[in-house]
Image (cartoon, coloured by chain):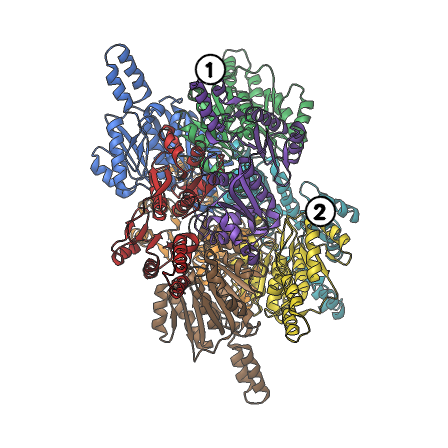
Chain colours: A cyan, B orange, C yellow, D brown, E purple, F green, G blue, H red
Amino acid sequence: MRPAELRALLGRVRGGKVTPADAARRISALSPEPLGFATLDHHRTLRAGFPEVIFGQGKTVAQIIAIAGRLFERHGLVLATRVSDEARIALAEAFPRAQVHDAARCVVLRRGRAPRGKGRVLVVCAGTADLPVAEEALVTARALGSHAELIADVGVAGLHRLLAHRERLRGARVLVVVAGLEGALPSVVGGLVDRPLIAVPTSVGYGAHFDGLAPLLSMLNSCAAGITVVNVDNGFGAGYAAHLINAGGRS
Amino acid sequence: MRPAELRALLGRVRGGKVTPADAARRISALSPEPLGFATLDHHRTLRAGFPEVIFGQGKTVAQIIAIAGRLFERHGLVLATRVSDEARIALAEAFPRAQVHDAARCVVLRRGRAPRGKGRVLVVCAGTADLPVAEEALVTARALGSHAELIADVGVAGLHRLLAHRERLRGARVLVVVAGLEGALPSVVGGLVDRPLIAVPTSVGYGAHFDGLAPLLSMLNSCAAGITVVNVDNGFGAGYAAHLINAGGRS
Amino acid sequence: MRPAELRALLGRVRGGKVTPADAARRISALSPEPLGFATLDHHRTLRAGFPEVIFGQGKTVAQIIAIAGRLFERHGLVLATRVSDEARIALAEAFPRAQVHDAARCVVLRRGRAPRGKGRVLVVCAGTADLPVAEEALVTARALGSHAELIADVGVAGLHRLLAHRERLRGARVLVVVAGLEGALPSVVGGLVDRPLIAVPTSVGYGAHFDGLAPLLSMLNSCAAGITVVNVDNGFGAGYAAHLINAGGRS
Amino acid sequence: MRPAELRALLGRVRGGKVTPADAARRISALSPEPLGFATLDHHRTLRAGFPEVIFGQGKTVAQIIAIAGRLFERHGLVLATRVSDEARIALAEAFPRAQVHDAARCVVLRRGRAPRGKGRVLVVCAGTADLPVAEEALVTARALGSHAELIADVGVAGLHRLLAHRERLRGARVLVVVAGLEGALPSVVGGLVDRPLIAVPTSVGYGAHFDGLAPLLSMLNSCAAGITVVNVDNGFGAGYAAHLINAGGRS
Amino acid sequence: MRPAELRALLGRVRGGKVTPADAARRISALSPEPLGFATLDHHRTLRAGFPEVIFGQGKTVAQIIAIAGRLFERHGLVLATRVSDEARIALAEAFPRAQVHDAARCVVLRRGRAPRGKGRVLVVCAGTADLPVAEEALVTARALGSHAELIADVGVAGLHRLLAHRERLRGARVLVVVAGLEGALPSVVGGLVDRPLIAVPTSVGYGAHFDGLAPLLSMLNSCAAGITVVNVDNGFGAGYAAHLINAGGRS
Amino acid sequence: MRPAELRALLGRVRGGKVTPADAARRISALSPEPLGFATLDHHRTLRAGFPEVIFGQGKTVAQIIAIAGRLFERHGLVLATRVSDEARIALAEAFPRAQVHDAARCVVLRRGRAPRGKGRVLVVCAGTADLPVAEEALVTARALGSHAELIADVGVAGLHRLLAHRERLRGARVLVVVAGLEGALPSVVGGLVDRPLIAVPTSVGYGAHFDGLAPLLSMLNSCAAGITVVNVDNGFGAGYAAHLINAGGRS
Amino acid sequence: MRPAELRALLGRVRGGKVTPADAARRISALSPEPLGFATLDHHRTLRAGFPEVIFGQGKTVAQIIAIAGRLFERHGLVLATRVSDEARIALAEAFPRAQVHDAARCVVLRRGRAPRGKGRVLVVCAGTADLPVAEEALVTARALGSHAELIADVGVAGLHRLLAHRERLRGARVLVVVAGLEGALPSVVGGLVDRPLIAVPTSVGYGAHFDGLAPLLSMLNSCAAGITVVNVDNGFGAGYAAHLINAGGRS
Amino acid sequence: MRPAELRALLGRVRGGKVTPADAARRISALSPEPLGFATLDHHRTLRAGFPEVIFGQGKTVAQIIAIAGRLFERHGLVLATRVSDEARIALAEAFPRAQVHDAARCVVLRRGRAPRGKGRVLVVCAGTADLPVAEEALVTARALGSHAELIADVGVAGLHRLLAHRERLRGARVLVVVAGLEGALPSVVGGLVDRPLIAVPTSVGYGAHFDGLAPLLSMLNSCAAGITVVNVDNGFGAGYAAHLINAGGRS
């Protein structure tokens, strides 16, 4: 139940179209639901405008299926990230309408048609190998209701590739910039625009890259003002924050 | 010259109120100005809506005074951060109207009256010792034109202190949450609101805190979605990003 | 031989019911027993109230079986932790009465019925993926003789799930709080209770989580007083310490 | 107001000795008190049995004095830790009855006589240079109401010094073991007793000690079961946890 | 050619029993021998009293076989360490008299009978899982010509197991002490003896053990004087150094 | 199109041998070519004298084949590094004339005959296990047009092996020195020559080697002047820089 | 004695203009000269074309003066780096012709006039605070005999400042690029030129900058090919290597 | 009381020259002596052949004086290391015969004449700035009774300086090799000798040296066999271990 839905429900109670008992039953369905291995936070949709997102890593396939089923039944909308190959196949079997994003390792379940995305989230990515993380951000922002686009493989060593997109960069409402190796792209993009920019380091690299530490530190120390950072490979977190910014905080 | 001013100038050229030569002279003043030890980016106001900010650390007092003077002359607005005690005193002497913020170690120079802040940036801080960083965020957001407020000393070990502010938290357009020690506050606040939240780790702690590494890692790994992070003690960066989000990217 | 048993034996010697020779033979059985690859510390039951625990990691299956056999013969009680899938199967075959805990990767062998657990150890866990570590703590505390319960999946991003258990939290004699990601849960729980709290970071996370370093640092720097910490994923150590506290140090 | 005091107050209300209005006024005094730079958690005494402790690091002298004054007025009992030389002198001047512990850098303010300590907390310390941390643990445990004793300079390189105290070690209800350098002492003591043991690494060392990282890792990886750990140099945290264990969780 | 053999050869030249030409040919055989992928240091036996040791890690099976063959032909003595399962099998096939030590992952090839070991190297190991490293030290010291013995599984949590060997510890000429987890054993042993002690940290542990970093730091910071340290799991290096010390530097 | 080719083309335009339209078409082919998952930087040959190099890690086999095909068609010259076994086989099938370097994990595609290498790049490598990285440097420098040679297995523990090559070392125009373990070789070589020296740390080692961190730090702190360093195992980067130096910056 | 001087001397011996005895005396003056606290490497000028450079850090003022005196007497040319304020003053007093570079903390002593610099070394620096390191590189390259120039304060957040210098960048024979904060400048410059580029990270930054670790890792992981790196703040090393490259390895 | 003295005393008891009561009194004087802030280990001389050494760091001047006085009275021999300037002056005043070593920051108190050193410990040091650590090793080895010599400033960048001492290196019984920066010297020396070699990293360096981490890792990963390592700047530990090796373990 999203905030607008709660207001509508209470309006129908006032208007006599829904009995207080019925309304009470529906509202109490927002209480946490214990599954033994999990405690579902159904109240979250009301609080945050979107149901709990399933973080697939470290959960068994059976746990993911069970949680997805309960969330889908209540909210008609499920996003699962970091879903293993095995679990993606199982979800696709269990929920035939599931949209499976293999590169991003995400699955979206949605009752009805997706709404038309609002605003403009622009995801920019430095190299081909960074694409899975960029796509996780894209899938997330779109699942939450934002309009989101991608510019791929415009790393700083070939600056003209990036500068060719200058207008598009300046036209976005919020940018997500994804980069591995030295992670310099957010600083360069940040110097070109006056929009909020979320930097995402990736684990693409080797040696003294330390699985993403190098670009993470790089982005935290950026000389361009207004850049904020998420965890290594956390396309989901960047897409989520970008949606919140894009939506003006409203959902 | 801010974007709106450029559009106005060009409008006046079209309307014959300003000669092309005059306009050209004023636009070319946006070229980088080399001072030997620095290259001033006067074009930045046009590009980013705000003049270059002076990062005081590592600059001599004379360099700071010189840069501030040039920027102030051109743009009528200067923000300097991480300004040493000695340099703050020197700036106050050189620019009698300078607003000096000692706890935040910032100085603001402004021609004319400050505009009335827009929107609502809420800075929340976990402990008394985190206040200087929180105030740097406040000063920055206000200097840029946002309305910004502070809630101090509401760390998670006394949760009722925080919960008492729940409505205020949910009413902000963007939140800046500042915490040292274990840095748990952004996760708890993030679970209560559906707004963009910028987490700022501070160097307040000791031992295995590693001068802010502990809360930095904590915030990067937050279980609450939509949180982005800036560098340790980077109140400036958080305030800047919060303003961009608050202003809807426009300036 | 536990302390009470030694006192009883010596009482029977004084009472003439056991000859000094018999008692000497039984007491000398407490000497370390060399197995070549291991030196069994049979005296430990007398010193610490519980036989040596088998740490399965890095031991061959044959070594684990041999050590378990000798300990079981002497003490009638064996706890083995970090036992590989292969070794759990082998133990179950070798000791048909073995209790195998697959998620916790533990095996308990016990002669006779388990005693009814005393006191109240409460294990609280932040996410579903942290359950194996929480269960290792549960199995350990119970094997040692404590009564222990579990509350699962009450992470800080959905605070109302945790607050719903406030009374249960305050009713425990000692708490074990298990969390991955940013590890904020112990600080929040620690602010709600006045009982000893043992925090257990887990390796659940990715990127700048560094396999548990993030929550480990978080817990070591907690702003809530009275929290102590064990190694990453060390459910065993937490369960053991919780039992010692719960038992008032007596065993 | 401690829990027992609240129960007594409510009893007097029921017995008609206190009016509901008076009781309400006294209970509402537990609400958080905002000082601008701090939000005092007066409710904490009721929740945790002891007023908020002042962490002196990062606070100005004026802030410490102000907080101490408010806490003392309400609760008659204040503990301040990590208090700088300057602030200890100022507190001693402001509160003539303050007990100042210079080595431990702590100050205790107490109305009336200290209660006679209960139980038995034993603080054991490896080297002379570790004494300040050990004394912070002692002062804390005593301030909270425990009986606490110290054994100094019994590092593992001269094992007979430690073994001479074996009976005393085994007689404690809970042990705090403080060590710098390699931090081996908790493992050795932990093998000799069956009581809860809190290990405190100190920053005493140099080179690859990394200001306490070496003994911290050592203690987290101890081969002795039942050891829990606090942050480097965190004598306060160890003393606090030891008191909670010693008091059986009651206060 | 070992130093004594060179002296003998030159003696025979002086005595006319060997022609200068023959001696020159034999001495020039000490020149480095290039194999393309390796440059064999045949001069090493003369310089260091023992031929080059083959470090198996990172070499192909074919490279190891080729190098072993060349060294064996020239020197009649080969020690190979960190030899993979596959390469050990291949060496056993290629050199039927090879002595294969599976736990230690070492192979020794020797022409003629092993000399009777001299002196007394004592290898002490904390846990069963540390045995492979301890055995690498044993095999190395023996291959070089030392007499070497082992005491296994005498970790500090059961101190009486160690103290039972006190006389044997004090009787060694040099000790190698191998420990994982917190690595406290060298400090305790170092406090009991006045002999050189080489500490070997192992990668046995988990979590904040960081694959051996914890005991490595522990040993480098030992409070017992006279302890030197080798790399994590470097049983070879410890055995080699122990032999040099045991042999009084002579070989 | 390399710089000389552009000058020639423009010369032919001036001479009337090529129409402006033809020249324009050829020059515009230098624009970035978007492939969806990649944006090819065809302009790079003009800017840097060599086409974009394919970094194989993190790209799918299909992506590598597609990029190689496009680059080969335009530039007649392709270098791909860090190509997996599977991708090397696929490239060899797709491009029958591909030169596959298995140890170096590189593939070179070239139209026509390789030019005769110029200058003298000398690659020196400390141990047999470092060879794959050394060969990546060799293959790269040769593909770019330099003459390059190798000296293998001359680590510092057998110094005479290195000193035997002193003249060859001093005769090179630039040196690439590859070493794992402690990475001491560059310092020793650097002290013997007055040429630019590029040091390459490798991941060959174990324990406190931290996958190449040890030699990386070693090389960054070298006491020999004039040494510069590349990332761990980055034979490609060293070979590339060596070529630029060897070619006097011209290509 | 530089290589050309040695050849000239030997030529004069052959021509009978210098007696063998005289020549022998002058050549033997190249032997190491022991000063007790130092062993001067006079042979170095012959081997490397430049006398030993004095690394001032960790040496007493008296030691620096003594070494400078001996080197100057023999070679007429001294470069001292990392010279403390106190030592610079002392050197200026002891050697009135000393050229003291305060920002760079360097001192140069030279007999006769400085030669006119050859080639073109271009030092580019990201921010004003990076200037001291950039100047150390400039002073070093010039002292060694190269022509060297500086472009200051052209960080990537204001890209047009850098692009304005594109031709100058492409005209250098070798570039030294100095940057603190995230260290992105070398990647961007590296993508614009086809010359050798030496990247120098600086310690300018705070928080997760870790005193230069962030830009160091950034530069080691650069996506631009041909970049090599020196230690944090090592302007000397970069200037030295740049000179070797600029001089074609000849001196 | 050293071992030989104990044997002599017991001999005199057997011979009737000393009464058992007298002997008992003298032997019991070996019991630990508690000073409140320290527990003196007088038994250590018997066990280890040398009295406890005073580690000055972290002790107050008064504590050092008191401990030195007690040890001197009992054993006539005191070594104190890491003694601050202030404490060295105080010791020199309190004990007029104290030998103060300022560079090494050591003080030796000795009753009677120093014995003539035995054997041959050779301390080799890479740079002038490493001298204080080398001297701490020298002072320690000599205080313990070894003959010890020094070779200074023979770093690997000027190899001929080292090779000039080849015979002296090979003639030592044990070597201590001290180096900062990259710490390559032990590997090179280790390849030249067949004697035990103790490597001592120093904190001399900057940037990615991390206060000695770079040479520490370097030495732990040395390619030369037989090298063992002590903590950064631990000249004392190296000198102590060298003495034990030099003395054949006897003292």
Circle nearer the viewer, 2 or 1: 1
* Whether residue D243 is situated above or below residue F28 in the rendered picture: below
Kind of residue sitting beneath label 2: Val
Towards the viewer: C221 or C174: C174
View extreme (front): residue: H15
The residue that mark 1 highlights is E19
Disc 2 crowd, CA 10 A, few/some/many (<14, 14-19, 20+): many
Residue E118: give x, y in percent of width and height: 51, 39
Would residue F11 appear left or right of G144 to someone viewing this image? right
Q: What element carries label 2?
A: strand
Tell me, yes or no, if residue A185 can be seen here.
no
Residue F198 locus on image (x, y percent):
46, 29
Judge left or right: residue B37 versus residue A71. left
The picture quadrant where one finds residue B157 is: bottom right
Give the distance between the C-alpha atoms of the residues marked 2 and 1, in whole angstroms.
84 Å
Label 1 packing within 10 angstroms: few (<14), some (14-19), many (20+): few
User: Between residues A240 and H167, which one lies in front from this camera angle?
Assistant: H167
Outermost residue to the top: G15
| Residue D8 percent across, percent down from the top left | 56, 83
Residue farthest along the bottom direction in this orientation: D16
Q: In this view, does B215 lie to the left or right of B60?
A: right
Residue shown at the point (43%, 33%) measured from the top left: H193
Report the amino acid beneath label 1. Answer: Thr
Label 2 sits on residue: A107
Helix, strand, or loop for circle 1? loop
Output the chain of dot 1: E
